[in-house]
Amino acid sequence: MKISITQRLFLAIALAAGMAVVSMVLIMQWSVQQGFLRYVNTMEKGGVSRLASSLEEGYRRETSWDFVLHYPAQWHRLAIAAMPGNIPPPPPGALPDPAQKPVLGEGPSPRPLPPRLAHYFFQHLFLLDADKKVLISRIEVPADSEATPLFHDGKIVGYLGLLPRKELSEPHQQRFLREQTLAFAIVAGIVLLLAAGLSLLLSRRLVRPLRSLAEATHHLAAGKFSTRVEVVSNDELGQLAGNFNLLATTLEKNEQARRQWVADISHELRTPVSILRGEIEALQDGIRQTGPESLRSLHNETLRLSRLVDDLYQLAMSDLGALTYRKEKLDLTEVLKETVGTYVADFSAKGITLATNLPSENPVTIFGDTERLHQLFANLLNNSLKYTDTAGELHITMICDERMVTIDFQDSAPGVTEADMERLFERLYRVEASRSRATGGAGLGLAICRNIVEAHQGKILVRHSALGGLWVQVELPLAEGK
């Protein structure tokens, strides 16, 4: 049998509330019973105090305990008069004067003892002499029993004691406890019903957003990335709903990027393939003659297609982390100088001034891959070479601090807008107005550069150059122990 989360929450909350209520009832019942027992013992101790006063008065008159030892009726009357909650003692003259020696069998007989006194109070009273020998008792008196000393002329002449109750045995006391137990049970039942009702409402309220999330997750798994859930609270469930919406937004953007990626790749591949197909068909139909010019055109389109495929492969490998990085400690200044040296002639041919400001005294040591760093700098140099206007400028500087080395590439016009600046690292994105497809680029260079920099635990940023073009800033961590 499958138990839903609503039922589980209801059972858990109801069970916890039930255990709390039952425990509370048991503790309260025990507390009432013990408190009532202490109350009864306290009341009976008051009766012992009154009886002790009567016995001391009788001993003062008789100077002995004979008035209770030889006359049990006198002991009974004094006990009746002293018992807690009993009727007032008889008026004067109703009890014989202890100074008078009643004769056994004569005088008024003792009044019938109330049941509760006969049951406990009277039966558990005991009288001891000054040496703690038992004078009157219907029970066996323990040696460590608590007793009230009786005095005459400042001397102890005896002890009066009452064994405390260990449990309540009188019918009216038990009836009182039963009534309290019944009242506790009724209260517990009402509380349990209320707890069950609140548990059901609370469990449904807690599960409602989870059901919404579960339903939205099914839609998301089916490809409906526009699915969103309503955030109705600021608690953990609200945070979960917000995170779900963020996940859905990310997946939606990734899906849009994937579709755009496929469309852009198809477009980029279709252009050289279409040119190649047209050139070949023109040669087949005799429209163009086979010669060095036609072969050069076919070769250029083939190279362009090869570069595009290679760039796509490099980007895919870097995204997957599958590019091979053979890192070691190296001098970054030497790597950059070598890469710049291979482009000096190309910049000079286009009339672009190439200026560098690199450290010459101390080596700039980092932990990296020489080949990948060559690829990084080559992409940035090639990017400036393609998109910088003739007779422009490119300034390259390298600055070090205690932990990082910063390489700045700043070229001259044309620049890019703020909106285009945010998208320069996107795959296949180009600023068509100036940095157009006519230059032959596929818009993958900066995306590959970012992956290489991130693989070296660095950062790459773009901003507007003071020269009017693009400023690319690369930050890489220095090797430890530099």
Image (spheres, grey):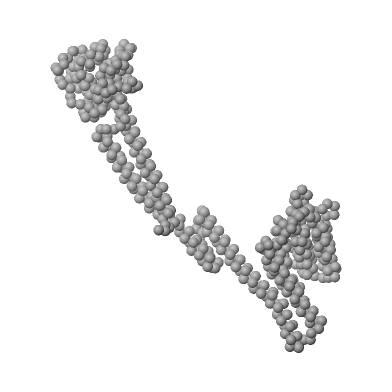
Closer to the camera in the image, 285 or 387 = 285
Q: Is residue 401 above or below residue 83?
A: below
Closer to the camera in the image, 323 or 195 = 323
User: Measuring 68% from the left and 64% from the top, which residue is drawn there?
Assistant: 317
Residue 128 picture quarter: top left
- Horizontally, residue 78 falls left or right of residue 454, namely left
User: Measuring 38% from the left and 47% from the top, which residue is drawn there?
Assistant: 18
Residue 351 percent coordinates (x, y) = 85, 69
- Horizontally, residue 393 falls left or right of residue 316, namely right
Closer to the camera in the image, 390 or 133 = 133
Closer to the camera in the image, 264 or 365 = 365
- Horizontally, residue 95 falls left or right of residue 392, namely left
Residue 2 picture quarter: bottom left
**Given the current orientation, which residue lies at the most extreme bottom position?**
286
User: Measuring 29% from the left and 37% from the top, which residue is drawn there?
Assistant: 177
Q: Count the numbered circles shown.
A: 0
Residue 468 percent coordinates (x, y) = 77, 65
Residue 72 percent coordinates (x, y) = 20, 19
Residue 421 percent coordinates (x, y) = 70, 65
- Horizontally, residue 44 falls left or right of residue 210, namely left
Q: Is residue 213 above or below residue 194?
A: below
Is residue 433 visible in the rendered image? The answer is no
